[in-house]
Amino acid sequence: MNPRDSLGIMDALENLNALVDADSLAEIEVIEDELIVSHKPDEEGSEREIYWVPAGADDRTLQAIRTTFKSVHDYLETFFVSMRERGDEKRLIEGVNTIMVLVSEATKKLERFDGLFKEKVVTIPEYKELQDFYKNTVIRESYQAFATTPIPQDKPSEEQKSWEAEHLDLFGEEERVIEETGVHILNDVEVIKHDHLYDLFFLKNEAGHNFYTYELARNIKLACNFGEFAKGYLGEDPLLQIKNWEDKTLHLKAQKILEVSHRQMERFYSEAMKYKGLELAMNLHNALMALMLAANPHNLIRQFALKGAHHYFYDFVYFLREVVHDREFEKLVLYGTPSGKPFFEDAYRLTHTLCNALHTLPSDEKELEAALEEHLQIEKPPKKLSEWLCQVYDKLIEVLEKHPSGPVFKALDRILEEQPPPFDPMLLGNFPSGEWKLGDEIEVLRIPCPTTQEWIGEAKITEEFKTFLRGLPLDKRVLLFNLQDRTSWREHARAHAIEELSKQAEFAEQLTVITLAKESEFYWQAGPYGSLEETTAFVTQFKEHLDDQMTGFWFPRKVKQELFPHFVDKVLTTVQEHYFFQKERLSLEERLDFIELVFVLIELKVIELIQPHYLCFMSKDGLDVAGSSSVAVMAFLALCQGVDLERKQVERILFGPTLMQRERLLQPERFARLQALLKRLENRGECHSAFAPLFKEGTLEREVQL
């Protein structure tokens, strides 16, 4: 059989898929026209008859692989020229990346096969030429195109210039870079890379202006100049498959949501045709159709579906939001469901079930876990959790050196949007999920702040979160630790909105909100607290801050009565005695650890008081602050009980969300704060006997289930 010069792109992609699906060369067959077919057993472990000619590490198999790589290369060159002529760089990168992810997966699978070819797959000329085209043509020219793309923002008007000067005067202490540069902090690319203030890209100030200026457009464009910014990122991007991971994760979540709601869906559709002209029925039907499409494996982007499963999941959330904002649904909330019309009762219950599943079901992130495991090979893992996390963090820094700054390119995408969304984590694809359990009764959720916000001074609770709360049985309570700073101009509106929600009679019995500010000057011992070394003065200040709403803390009246003054006094005294040995002066590092540990103990006491069914550590996006706080609590309990945490799951909880949502590491100051606390706890050793008297029996014995 004469070898073919090339294959059609669909045949080439089928070949790659066959290689990815196979677990050994014995499971693939090279048939006519250099097509590769994968053969899998019908049942795992069952005996099977070999009815094909298994491929070997021979010239025929190698030729089929060569032809596949060449065909992909030829197609990408044509696709590249077509997309470049249309000026569609974003679609170009997405399309090419999807194919290159499949190439990468197939190549890794070939390298793991038992059979050894005469030459390594990565040294095959056709493979090298394909990779060279991708790195040196697609990536370089696409980044250069980004750098020259016009920014849709006019030069600032005199009014805008006046506001910018006023803004600098008003917030100069909080938002200035090194004075010599004279650059507004939001125009500093380094600040964007650190990703602390990205929510401001979606917000406007009270005057209706953006929090970035015309100068930012120029700086971003300069940052995206490939020769200056992306130098050193060539190589295999460790996050190249991130869109595939998101696609598969949301696909699996859609399947789980369908599983828990299928009975109510059947009841809904039994009556829905009678009300097909009703917007409520149409929107709920559209939400369910989008959910079914997201759950269909044929719509995964790795199957080269025209629209990926993750886009269908976004559609599901969009239509679900339309449902909870529908006038008919609002009537059902206010007046209840009408008797004799089962459709409305079914639609109402189904909507609550969907909202509950969206907020509480865990996400299956096995692909992310597998990627972390692949990149985080530690030869001799240390016994202490703090040392292991430190090694993992250093390894991730090394791995992500091959990945361009996710926050910078996300900022670029935001600036280029013609109709930018408000700051609404759900709309940005940052979906809530269950993460771990505390004992058998408490489910710990990762929920970004459930608000939608267009203006810096105003935030509104999302209706789907309210619907989630309304749908809970009376005996299921939600405890939410709000870790935003209610005294900060950047976070006050969101903190205020979530606190006020817990005061409303409709939600007061089921939602308890505790605000523990983790962005304040006191928390970081900065500004006037930087020199607060005398122990008595520090402890006194700490107690005063905890008891004062004006310093960033907020407790409901009933909870506050239980905490103050006796419990707080005992906690401060016990921490001082057990970990700091009645020292007269405390260093900065010691004060930071002191504050962090007291926060953990207060959180455990409130859990004991409220006995919630759902527990949430909440920051603006549920990422750095929330993740490190969640791990601090589980690590303290594990140390009290003398047990080891499942480290791969700690890794997923601590590092996974920031990688998936922002394409970066956990912010270094948050990691350093957590690591320092763990180190102090580990060095001191047994702590159960010291703190058990502060709690009821069983509180410190709750099992951490990951």
Image (cartoon, rainbow, N blue to C red):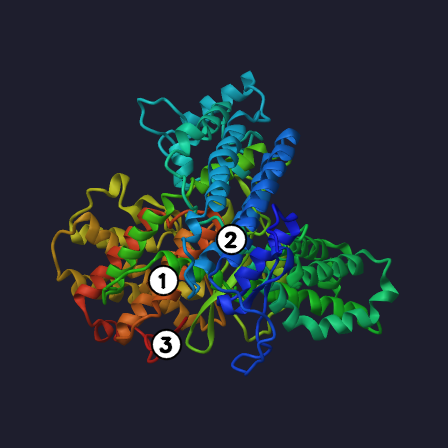
Q: What residue is at 67 percent from the left and 57 percent from the top?
A: 316
Q: Amino acid at mark 3?
A: Arg
The quadrant of the image that shows the C terminus is bottom left
Instruction: Measure the C-alpha gap from mark 1 to mark 2.
Output: 18 Å
Q: Nearer the viewer, residue 450 or 545?
A: 450
Q: Nearer the viewer, residue 236 or 474?
A: 236
Instruction: Measure the C-alpha gap from mark 3 to mark 2.
Output: 27 Å
Furthest residue in direction front, as rendered:
1
Q: Residues within 10 Å of mark 2 (few under 14, many from 20)?
A: many
Q: Earlier in the sequence, mark 3 or mark 1?
A: 1
Q: Earlier in the sequence, mark 3 or mark 2?
A: 2
Task: Give the structural element (helix, strand or loop) at label 2.
Answer: loop
Q: Residues within 10 Å of mark 3 (few under 14, many from 20)?
A: some
Q: Nearer the viewer, residue 532 or 293?
A: 293
Q: Which residue has dot 1 on it?
A: 631
Q: Position of residue 32 (x, y in %)?
A: 64, 59
Q: Amino acid at mark 1?
A: Val
Residue 449 tag number: 2
Q: Which residue has dot 3 on it?
A: 702
In this rendering, position of residue 68 left or right of residue 668: right
The quadrant of the image that shows the N terminus is bottom right
Q: Amino acid at mark 2?
A: Cys
Q: Earlier in the sequence, mark 1 or mark 2?
A: 2
Judge depth for marks 3 and 1 and give the one in front: 1
Q: Residues within 10 Å of mark 1 (few under 14, many from 20)?
A: some
In this rendering, position of residue 299 left or right of residue 244: right
Q: How many marks?
A: 3
